[in-house]
Image (spheres, coloured by chain):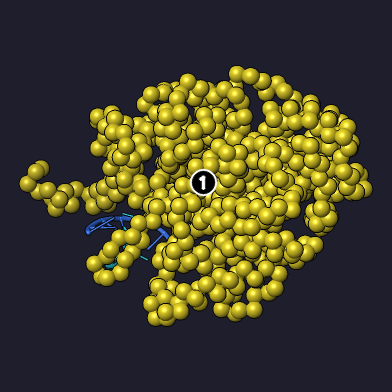
Chain colours: A yellow, B blue, C cyan
Amino acid sequence: MEKVVEAEGSDEGKFEETGLETSNFVLSSPKNVTDPVVYKLVRVDGNGRLVPATDDELMEVEGLLENEKRETHIVADTGQALGCISNEVSPSGMPQLESSEGLSQSENTEADTEKLSAYLEETVPSGAKSSSDDHVTQSGRVGECLKPLDGPLEGGSSTSTGCISSKPDFSKLKGEICLDNLSIKELHEVFKATFGRDTTVKDKLWLKRRIAMGLTNSCDVSATTFVIKDNKLVKKDNEDGFNNVNLGAGKEHLAVAVEYNEDLLNNLSSQIDEHQTTSEVRLGNNVVENNFASEDLAADQRAAKRVRKPTKRYIEELSEAESKEYSGRSIASTKSIGFRPLSSKAHARPARNVSLEGRTVITRLDSLGGFGIQVPCVYRIRRSRPRKNVTALLKFHPSGMGMTATFIKKGFDVHGSQMDNGSMNKVLEAKSTPEQAPEQFVAESKKETTPTDMGQNMGLKYVDPSGDTSDDNVVTVPTAKGGIRRKHHRAWTLSEVMKLVEGVSKYGAGRWSEIKRLAFASYSYRTSVDLKDKWRNLLKASFAQTPTDKGANSRKHPSMPIPASILLRVRELAEMQAQASLPNLSTGKLSACGGGSVNETRPGYL
DNA sequence: TTTAGGG
DNA sequence: CCCTAAA
């Protein structure tokens, strides 16, 4: 808190490049951060010059920090809203926010997101960085980005809301869930029930927040007490009466310090989530967790993830992830790298382009504040089907590994230089599977909006906090035909199940690809087949277990107990559809065939 | 490519 | 979950 760092030229350049012209915002260059608590105090005045914050400003900022700790989420939210409004008002490409109130507000938001993205940039040395970076930045100033941002906002909640109407009940808690009274162990259970994965985090607050996020489909869980009712967080303290005035404070030359606040990160990740594609979303989530870890809350959790060491599989997936996930954004990222001051950064972070989704932890050597510091990075590796080519390749050439390695290495170097390797381009093209863009989601959610209880949760953005951070267990199963096939297992989270149920209710069972596309756009894993299988299982479970209501619930460990409410819904849907399809066919046939055909079916019985 | 069903 | 036949 005592350090005031001047933003680097590179950052300045970046902002200019990205065309930011808002009168003032705060820069952050986490690179210089030596202590994960806060940082960067820089003031920017109208002409874009950077001025190191003075001690006075520092004090001022400290005051603000107090506020921010509590109100950050609100600030961000209102800022968003404001941004939307002002953008709608002046869609003419005049993104400037005019009212002084609005100015300072959005300014703050922008600053926050900016900082966060900067932080992300640091924490997530991936190609996604620059794009997400730009994205966020733009969303702050250009209207176009706010639109897609608005859509998923509704859609996200709409999809999950419908089915949450049956509250997730953890057998112990009905209706109202009060996380405050739970022990850590209980919180762990709830956590698992909510996200389908275990956590080793022992921090109650963290758990509560996380769970609350999951249950409320919102990131806005920065309250200090956690009582969840009707999927909404009941806050004891400060009501929403707080009206975004406080922070506005109408400071033209505002120096804002941003701490590594969970709220901010959550908000950011949610914002990113809005319009980023899956992998980036994952990154966001990872960052959140990672950050928590850096706050020594989830250290062990991270440690758990670090266990697995890179294997052949890793290499394989690595290369695949690179080609598959990286492709879409790689263009953009290289582009942005192009106009970036220079790749001194890039050199500092060789791990950057390894893989967007890599879950494997790589510690990269980074220079933070002049010290060489090992920064653990969590990457996710895209789950993928085994590639026959690769395995074949590896079999044939003992050097197969080597090849793959060089391939990857190229990925490293690709950076600014163009990809000279034709084959690589080819791979990229071939493998590039542009994930379903948010737009689709938006459109869909718009037209699918049902008048039910959707409205209330409208504004809440849902980030499946467990989402992609959960481990994917890869188990190798020996197969008869000599090969060994890998079995990926990814526990279905409650939210996924709910999405699925809702998807089925909307589009009907059997239209898996539709459901996958529309309701699971953000889950790049979960193929339509997966959905189908899951539904099949749900069906089985619902019919098998509904009679004895406690069946699955009493069973503790086996697998995540699916809330009875959901099973009920499943059964209803199943029956509905059974009756929806059968009568149609039978009536059709009967009416068409008339009485003549009666004999054919069951002559003896009639 | 997507679905359905078996393993 | 994976695999595969059929559409």
Is disc 1 placed on a helix, strand or loop? helix
For the N terminus of chain A, the quadrant is top right
Please name the residue that numbered disc 1 is placed on. Answer: A302
Looking at the image, can residue A557 be seen? yes
Q: Is residue A86 left or right of residue A205?
A: right
Q: Residue at x 83, y 47 (%)?
A: A6
In the image, residue A181 sits, relative to residue A475, either above or below, namely: above
Q: Is residue A370 left or right of residue A598?
A: right
**Where does residue A170 sit, x and y in percent of width and height?**
39, 28
For image coordinates 43% across by 73% down, the residue present is: A390
- The disc numbered 1 marks a residue on which chain? A
Q: Tell me the quarter of the picture where residue A546 sits.
A: top left
| Residue A190 shows in this picture | no
Residue A19's x, y, as percent? Answer: 82, 54
- At 74% from the left and 27% from the top, the residue drawn is A67
Instruction: Indicate whether A396 appears above or below A60.
Output: below
Q: Residues within 10 Å of mark 1 (few under 14, many from 20)?
A: many
In this rendered view, identify the residue nearer to me: A27 or A495: A27
Q: Is A411 placed left or right of A103 in the picture?
A: left
